[in-house]
Image: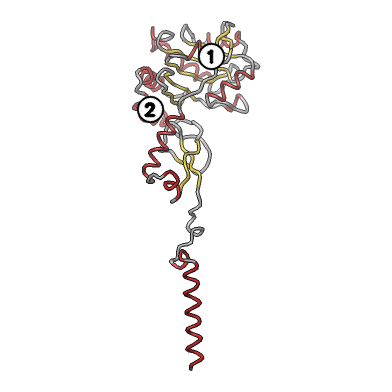
């Protein structure tokens, strides 16, 4: 009987020792079991409410998702902010990153004239930019037709207040002459500039605008709308109704793109 008593005491002492050595496990709290390791979350620069645990594109504007912040209990502790405050900070940071850094590469327009992309076409202007190539038979003709309607509806504002720009994603094929012939199909007028150039310069520009692709046929029907002076930019579905793009252009021109972006993105996504 006495030996059973001492054995029980020894077992109890051993259990208490384990609890003291590992209070987290004694409370049933295993950090690894609960998956508290930091996890990268990807968000859209223009729509911070869009989140994913994997890289990809925003379903609203097709912009590449970017790492936002680490998830888990330690995320707020690292910055000294509460989780809600961290989320707000991440949203503001994403918006700040959406400001474009546009290289002033030298290109050729459809008339063969040299243009510096940033200085001559973008600086201080409201712009709408799409991405095309002249041998495309799928999405590029509708993109051209949409810009033609936008140009018509802009009227005298085209070229004066708003610049439409089409960038060739196939500069090796698209000479200025080919661009001019393509533009003529859509009655492109002053205020709609098409550009091509040496492939290294075009590739640099496409990367900066988030439109680089491995092959011209892989490019998406994205339209980049922005007001360089106000630092406001967004992406829209280029095959949306022209009225959708016009609303974004008007909002960008007046510096109200942030308030107009969600409704127009949702409308274009439904089409």
Q: Residue at position x 34%, y 23% from top?
A: 256
Residue at screen point 47% across, 57% down: 34
Q: Is residue 41 above or below residue 145?
A: below
Label 2 vs 1, first from the N-terminus: 1
Secondary element at tag 1: helix
Labelled pair 2, 1 in contact (Cβ < 8 Å): no
Q: Which residue is the site of mark 2?
A: 261
- Measuring from the top left, give residue 265's x and y in whole percent: 40, 29
Quarter containing the C terminus:
top left
Instruction: Determine whether 86 is above or below 1 in the image.
Output: above
Which of 175 and 89 lies nearest the eye of the viewer?
Answer: 89
Residue neighbourhood size for the residue with mark 2, other residues' Cα within 10 Å, grouped as few (<14), some (14–19), many (≥20): many
Q: Nearer the viewer, residue 167 or 181?
A: 167
Residue at image point 49% right, 58% down: 31
Look at mark 1 in the image and give the residue it sits on: 117
Name the front one of labels 2 and 1.
1
**Which mark, residue 93?**
none
Q: In the image, is 135 to the left or to the right of 234?
A: right
Number of marks in picture: 2
In the depicted structure, whether residue 34 falls above or below residue 209:
below
**Relative image position of residue 194 (x, y in whole percent):** 54, 12
Residue 94 x/y as whole percent:
44, 33
């Amino acid at each position: 009987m006495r030996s059973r008593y001492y054995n029980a005491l020894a077992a109890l002492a051993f259990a208490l020792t384990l609890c003291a050595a590992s209070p987290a496990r004694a409370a049933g709290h295993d950090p690894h079991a609960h998956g508290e390791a930091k996890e990268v979350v990807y968000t859209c620069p223009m729509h911070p409410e869009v989140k994913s645990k994997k890289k990809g594109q925003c379903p609203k504007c097709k912009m590449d998702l970017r790492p936002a912040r680490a998830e888990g209990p330690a995320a707020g502790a690292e910055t000294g902010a509460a989780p809600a405050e961290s989320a707000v900070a991440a949203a503001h940071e994403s918006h700040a990153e959406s400001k474009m850094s546009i290289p002033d590469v030298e290109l050729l327009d459809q008339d063969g004239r040299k243009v510096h992309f940033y200085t001559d076409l973008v600086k201080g202007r409201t712009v709408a930019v799409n991405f095309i190539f002249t041998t495309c038979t799928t999405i590029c003709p509708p993109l051209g037709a949409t810009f033609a309607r936008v140009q018509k509806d802009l009227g005298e504002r085209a070229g004066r207040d708003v610049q439409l720009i089409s960038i060739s994603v196939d500069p090796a094929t698209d000479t200025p002459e080919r661009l001019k012939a393509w533009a003529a199909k859509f009655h492109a007028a002053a205020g709609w500039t098409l550009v091509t150039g040496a492939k290294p310069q075009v590739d640099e520009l496409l990367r900066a605008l988030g439109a680089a692709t491995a092959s011209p046929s892989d490019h998406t029907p994205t339209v980049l709308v922005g007001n360089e002076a106000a630092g406001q930019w967004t992406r829209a579905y280029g095959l949306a109704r022209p009225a959708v793009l016009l609303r974004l252009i008007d909002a960008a021109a007046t510096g109200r793109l942030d308030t107009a972006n969600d409704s127009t993105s949702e409308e274009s996504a439904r089409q």
